[in-house]
Image (cartoon, rainbow, N blue to C red):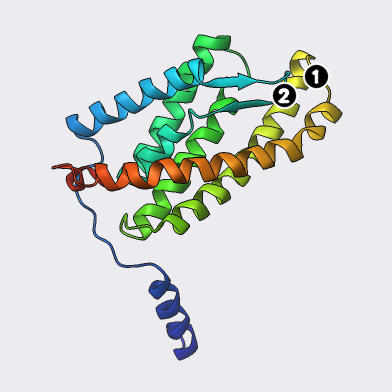
Amino acid sequence: MPTKKENKMVTYLKSLMPERQRRGPLFTPQKLATNAILIALHIILARMASIRIGPSFSITVSGITEVVAGLLFGPVSGGTVGLLGSFLNQVIAYGLSVTTVLWILPAAVKGLMCGWYAKAYDYDLSPFQILWILLVSSLVVTSMNTVVMIIDAEIFHYSTKATVLGMMAARYISGALTSVAYMLVTTPLLHRLKKLPGIRKLRE
């Protein structure tokens, strides 16, 4: 039997998250088609809008696809776009390897985090909230990528652990700056997309 103090704590925790209702099925033809477009865009941006600096550092804007999918539709779409977009890009660029699964997880996590946060606030986020989740997810993803780079470098012997760790500060700074750029792009983009007919029905 919960105590009065426990009941107050539960009530307080619930108040932190606005109530929300499930809007519809997770997968519909319209949502699958939209996610497919974002996945294709992820690959295009990864191939054409990325700058690689050495074996352990790169700058890319492909991550904006899973961010938009998550903030617009929810965690399943965000995670799916990040996972499949990153997987297909990895296969095209490097082929399948023992570490392919590790490389695609960070993008999926970013999409999931953005989607969960947006869903928690009923997809009504201020620019500050968008920047906040982008910065937090960037911190998590950069940390994950660092671990993956160390594992990958150890297996294929193309770099050293010291070299990878030496680039950490630069990657965190790059992630923070990219988050600001993503916020500036996604805020007006989401504002326009939310006005399109049928968008609400595609939310999770």
Quick check: 17 above or below 93?
A: below
Residue bearing the label numbered 1: 159
Quick check: 116 above or below 17?
A: above
Furthest residue in direction bottom, as rendered:
4
Q: Amino acid at mark 2?
A: Ser
Circle 2 or circle 1, nearest the eye:
2
Q: Nearer the viewer, residue 64 or 25?
A: 64
Dot 1: element: loop
Camera sees residue 2: no
What's the CA distance linking mark 2 and mark 1? 8 Å
Name which residue lies at 58% across and 10% down: 94
Quarter of the view holding residue 174: top right
Residue 30 in the figure: left or right of residue 128 = left
Name which residue lies at 54% across and 43% down: 179
Quick check: 108 above or below 13?
A: above
2 and 1 marks in contact (CB < 8 Å): yes
Name which residue lies at 32% across and 45% down: 190
Camera sees residue 177: yes
